[in-house]
Amino acid sequence: MPDQDQLARVRASFARQTVMDTIGATLEHVEPGRITIALPVSPRISQQHGFVHAGIVSTIADSACGYAAFSLMRPGAGVLTVEFKVNLMSPASGSRLIAEGRVVRAGRTLTVCQAEVFAETRGDRKTVALMTATLMTIEGRDDVVD
Amino acid sequence: MPDQDQLARVRASFARQTVMDTIGATLEHVEPGRITIALPVSPRISQQHGFVHAGIVSTIADSACGYAAFSLMRPGAGVLTVEFKVNLMSPASGSRLIAEGRVVRAGRTLTVCQAEVFAETRGDRKTVALMTATLMTIEGRDDVVD
Amino acid sequence: MPDQDQLARVRASFARQTVMDTIGATLEHVEPGRITIALPVSPRISQQHGFVHAGIVSTIADSACGYAAFSLMRPGAGVLTVEFKVNLMSPASGSRLIAEGRVVRAGRTLTVCQAEVFAETRGDRKTVALMTATLMTIEGRDDVVD
Amino acid sequence: MPDQDQLARVRASFARQTVMDTIGATLEHVEPGRITIALPVSPRISQQHGFVHAGIVSTIADSACGYAAFSLMRPGAGVLTVEFKVNLMSPASGSRLIAEGRVVRAGRTLTVCQAEVFAETRGDRKTVALMTATLMTIEGRDDVVD
């Protein structure tokens, strides 16, 4: 059974990621081990050719991975990204981007997640990026909680 | 001798990366094969614990790599990120972040770059992230020029 | 319809990978865009704790990715690995390892593949590694054909 | 002052990596946080075009990283590779390969290392690969010691 308290902590923690407001991303869906984030494409997040910047694509993919990992953690734990790798398979354009992150393996200290980022254009969906990330469970550090 | 025209193209292209305005990053230094980008730390780019979001750290590292690669390309070429991998070694905080990107190997089609991101705090410098990126030279595509 | 000639080229090319004999790996299954390689666990390929060395796990995963990419290429092309990233999720032990590689996106120049490596122990299967790889199609180079 | 006991443990542990005998690799140099491994190029470790297989290049790079990390650990600890990423910049050929691994950041639980692999040909040296790896210190597990 989903731990509703932890899913509420995911939402509260996401709401504290001020960068999401800055770029315009929202939390679309939360379930244990699986997170969806949406990002409308806008000129404010573009690189030089008008596509969404690869770093912004990575920002939503990283948060989708991080909160997928965090959704399975115990109260009081925090999550930090150890590393991630992202392949940019198509220029990110369209009307909005969707990042879906899921836990591949949850360990005691480290969790491996993968995320796929899609670009939506008038109902079509195209994969623009794939991420694999390693996240760390942090316990006992006051500055890294929730 | 540095190709001043190409270095001017780097600056002009960076100025078109509207995301840099959105997050507050500026191009600090340009030389052939080597780029420095600065980003003042602000609450607008934070993750949930108040550190700069790993995706934003990656955004300046990716642009530092991309423009390092681009600085060695011929007129008319464009650059796209194929993939990158970033290790986040310390939480990104302090007064500002500095991303230094450099070309490790420039090939005809693919260029490998590395970037280091430092956090500055009252004169101290601490490495917060290391990136290795693969960039692609794009020629003959109207939507990917400069 | 599968291109039987190209699948035959996959088998012939794999047979020239002398390292596969050295470590004891065999090509189990070939279909367009999807390759399976098997590797019996033996003390000859161990790291210090008796597990299969991460580099050997990567060797079969990389070949599974490379031949998945190659299986979709045209006659006369060769394939080279540009980069790969592998997460080792569990120590690799058991009776044999199975690497399954598949094409995620086949482009004109670059192909992105992913591989999963399983360890089999008395019928059980456990994921030990995940790889994402970028492969390059090489044309017109005499030393990189098939 | 270098911890001679720990450097002796590096050598003893490397000697237990039976895969190194199988491929012909030797430990060339050990100092705290820095390891060099040499591998004569031979047809036994080739891919289909006669170059050293990317997975074998990774095998020596991974061990160079792993032992660089291990050289700074305390007695009784073991080391496991969490993940690595490798860029293959030139086909690996020549007379022998040299992998140099060094610690970039040693944390309590995780250590980040980088390795460079060179190919030597009649005195010339060419970089063939760059690796960034995350290693984990394992304590209290009987099957992962030294």
Image (cartoon, coloured by chain):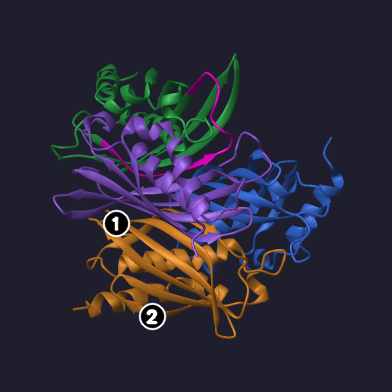
Chain colours: A green, B purple, C blue, D orange
**In the displayed structure, does residue D108 sit left or right of residue C39?**
left
Extreme-right residue of the structure? C5
Image quadrant for the C terminus of chain B?
top right
Which quarter of the figure has residue D34? Answer: bottom left
Closer-to-camera residue (B109/B130) = B109
Q: Residue at x 23, y 54 (%)?
A: B126
**In the displayed structure, does residue D100 sit left or right of residue D71?**
right
Image vertical order of residue D34 relative to residue D79, above or below: below
Q: CA distance from mark 1 to mark 2?
A: 24 Å
Mark 1 or mark 2, earlier in chain? 2
Residue B110: x percent and y percent?
A: 59, 53
- Is residue D60 in the magenta section? no
Magenta span: helix, strand or loop, mainly? strand
Chain holding disc 2: D
Closer-to-camera residue (B53/D67) = B53
Q: Residue A67, labelled with which disc?
A: none
Residue D12 makes an appearance in the image: yes
The kind of secondary structure element at disc 2 is strand
Chain holding disc 1: D
Label 2 crowd (10 A; few <14 / some 14-19 / many >=20): few
The kind of secondary structure element at disc 1 is strand
Q: Which residue is mark 2?
A: D29
Closer-to-camera residue (C50/B33) = B33
Dot 1 and dot 2 within a common chain: yes
Residue C87 makes an appearance in the image: no
Magenta highlight range:
A79-97
Residue C87: x percent and y percent?
A: 46, 48
Q: Nearer the viewer, mark 1 or mark 2?
A: 2
Amino acid at circle 2: His
Image vertical order of residue B59 relative to residue B6, above or below: above
Q: Which residue is mark 1?
A: D138
